[in-house]
Image (cartoon, helix red, strand yellow):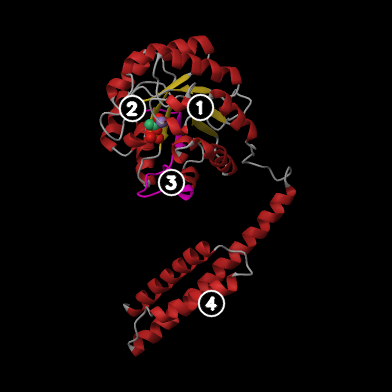
């Protein structure tokens, strides 16, 4: 079903690649039961479980470690589901490979550290295994790209990306702010890579999972990583965001899957609307170019008459006027503000160039 990267074949009935399993492997029983109940849904492609858990503070459950690897191997044998674990050190890579883990993933707290990513990359030289890379906890997509390049340079061909949101101080709505624009830019730069959303770690709570999942599907993501547990409320880590395999199945059933690459013949109406958008974008650019020519002329005038570039009262007047006009246009105030700030800044830069030339 997903063919841009066929390293994780989507055999499930869902419209994308589905990765699920507990935040942490806790007991053999819990691992086996979760895997069996996930397999029974027919909607899961890859079974995940954290066994080395990088935790924010000491004293929290830090994972079972290598002792859980035989449980995962057993789960694979029983269910036929391939497995994935998070790795952060060379030793963890070595142990995971020994126990036939099928896919490795690099966690958000590891992607931030080039030394750690390089250590994992070095351990992967000469190994043929798919690797999924989560975004770093801080909103820095170059760091994410850098991690991808390090793994790529180790010779790994099958690399996917997981968007799990970015840590931000004082954020109440999300555990990790999605900052969709950053993920979209990363997706644009790497359009041939599998791109997965992890709504569990973005939301941090189970009630927002469907909405976040749908949003990622609407943006053309290729699949989802969602944490599941047989008894979510008493999970040893991330209890608030985990759901049972059966609830996962319900959520997946509610998602409306959409196709990204609609062809022209199939969707003539869409193509016509897109042509209109392209035309308007073109006009907007021309108009912005003209606006900046006027800014240049203003810059020249201010230079001659020794007037400052920025005048707070003028800027406030502009904003007041556009907010008033916008009421009939249907644009959000937030957009208007961002747009005018960007235009204003560009205008100031133009005037600066003229003044100092
Ligand atoms: C996890 O997947 O359980 C995990 C630790 O995720 P992240 O690296 O996104 O915090
Ligand atoms: Mn987790």
Give the alpha-carbon distance from disc 4 to disc 2, as whole Å: 53 Å
Does the numbered disc 1 mark a residue whose Cβ is under 8 Å from ligand 1? no
Residue density around tag 1, few if under 14, some if 14–19, many if 20 or more, within 10 Å: many
Pick whichever of labels 4 and 3 is earlier in the sequence.
3
- Tell whether label 2 touches label 1 (CB within 8 Å): no
Q: Nearer the viewer, residue 56 or 69?
A: 56
Count the labels in the image: 4
Does 309 sit above or below residue 95? below
Taking the spot 44% from the left edge, 71% from the top edge, the residue there is 344
Q: Quadrant of residue 211?
A: top right
Label 3, on which residue? 177
Label 4, on which residue? 321
Give the alpha-carbon distance from disc 4 to disc 1, as whole Å: 50 Å
Residue density around tag 2, few if under 14, some if 14–19, many if 20 or more, within 10 Å: many
Label 2, on which residue? 53
Give the alpha-carbon distance from disc 3 to disc 1, as whole Å: 21 Å
Q: Quadrant of residue 30?
A: top left
Would residue 311 be seen by someone viewing this image from the given angle? yes
Q: Is residue 77 left or right of residue 152?
A: right
Mark 4 lies on a secondary structure that is: helix
Mark 2 lies on a secondary structure that is: loop
Q: Nearer the viewer, residue 214 or 145?
A: 214
- Name the image quarter holding the C terminus: bottom left
Q: Is residue 227 left or right of residue 117?
A: right
User: Which span is picked out in magenta?
Assistant: 155-182
Does 204 sit above or below residue 72? below
Label 1, on which residue? 19
> How far from the left and from the top, in percent, is residue 164?
44, 38
- Tell whether label 3 touches label 4 (CB within 8 Å): no
Pick whichever of labels 3 and 1 is earlier in the sequence.
1
Pick whichever of labels 1 and 2 is earlier in the sequence.
1
């Amino acid at each position: 079903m997903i063919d841009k990267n066929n390293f994780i074949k989507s055999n499930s009935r869902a419209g994308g690649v589905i990765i699920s399993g507990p935040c942490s492997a806790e007991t053999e029983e819990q691992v086996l039961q979760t895997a069996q109940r996930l397999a029974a849904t027919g909607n899961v492609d890859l079974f995940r479980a954290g066994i080395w858990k990088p935790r924010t503070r000491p004293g929290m459950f830090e994972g079972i470690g290598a002792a859980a690897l035989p449980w995962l191997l057993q789960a694979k044998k029983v269910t036929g589901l391939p497995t994935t674990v998070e790795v952060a050190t060379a030793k963890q890579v070595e142990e995971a490979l020994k126990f036939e883990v099928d896919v490795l993933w690099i966690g958000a707290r590891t992607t931030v550290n080039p030394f750690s990513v390089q250590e994992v990359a070095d351990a992967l030289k000469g190994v043929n295994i798919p690797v999924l890379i989560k975004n770093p906890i801080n909103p820095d997509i170059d760091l994410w790209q850098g991690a991808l390049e390090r793994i790529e340079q180790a010779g790994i061909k099958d690399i996917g990306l997981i968007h799990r949101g970015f840590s931000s101080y004082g954020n109440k709505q999300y555990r990790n702010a999605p900052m969709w624009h950053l993920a979209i830019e990363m997706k644009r730069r790497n359009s041939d890579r599998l791109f997965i959303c992890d709504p569990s770690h973005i939301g941090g709570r189970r009630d927002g999972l469907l909405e976040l999942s749908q949003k990622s599907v609407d943006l053309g993501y290729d699949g989802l990583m969602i944490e599941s547990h047989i008894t979510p409320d008493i999970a040893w880590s991330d209890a608030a965001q985990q759901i049972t395999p059966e609830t996962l199945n319900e959520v997946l059933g509610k998602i409306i899957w959409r196709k990204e690459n609609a062809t022209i013949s199939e969707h003539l109406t869409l193509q016509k609307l897109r042509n209109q958008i392209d035309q308007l974008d073109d006009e907007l650019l021309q108009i912005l170019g003209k606006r900046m020519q006027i800014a240049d002329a203003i810059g020249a005038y201010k230079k001659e008459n020794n007037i400052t570039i920025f005048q707070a009262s003028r800027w406030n007047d502009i904003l007041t006027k556009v907010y008033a006009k916008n009421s009939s246009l249907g644009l959000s105030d937030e957009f208007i503000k961002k747009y005018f700030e960007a235009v204003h800044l560009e205008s100031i830069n133009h005037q600066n160039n003229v003044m100092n030339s």
